[in-house]
Amino acid sequence: MPYAGVRRMLETSLEEVPMESTNAAALELRRVASHEWVVYDLQYPMDDSRCLVACLSETEDDLVEVVWLQGTTLPVLYRSPTEVLEDLVRHRNAGLRLRRPDEIPHRPPFSERGHRPRVA
């Protein structure tokens, strides 16, 4: 089973699984086995399914294979787990910049007979 460490982590409490973590923005990379990692989104509680972003496993070729759990269009092969995290942070930051600005509501101008109080 390629993600035995992830299954073991989900079946046991977080304190029982040896982990290494690296913080980057609202994302966290945790080692769950000798050749497996999980990327968490810290915006969500641990019991929320949106918290798990990706599962990573090291291949025999010393590459990292990624299974994206949130529908990300990023590549599935990387050179290292930290490269996965850096690419994900770049991807999320680019997505924030590409958003349209918030729309300002438009209202008709005040008329002479309208709702504007007159100054005496």
Image: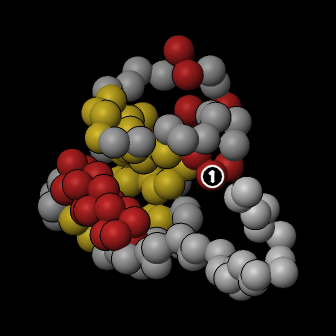
In the rendering, at what x and y percent does residue 4 appear? Answer: 52, 44
> In the image shown, does 33 or 100 lie closer to the viewer?
100
Q: Is residue 14 left or right of residue 115?
A: left
> How many other residues sit within 10 Å of disc 1, few (<14), some (14-19) or many (≥20)?
some
Give amino acid for label 1: Arg
Question: Where residue 80 appears, x then y in whole percent?
Answer: 18, 54
Q: Identify which residue is drawn at 78% across, 62% down.
A: 117
Disc 1: which residue:
50
Residue plotted at (55% across, 22% down): 14
Residue 107, percent from left and from top:
70, 80
Relative to 16, say whether 35 is above or below. below
Quadrant in the picture for residue 46: top right
Q: Work out whether 41 lies above or below 64.
A: above
The coloring applied to the image is secondary structure
Q: Secondary structure beneath disc 1?
A: helix
- Quadrant holding the C terminus: bottom right
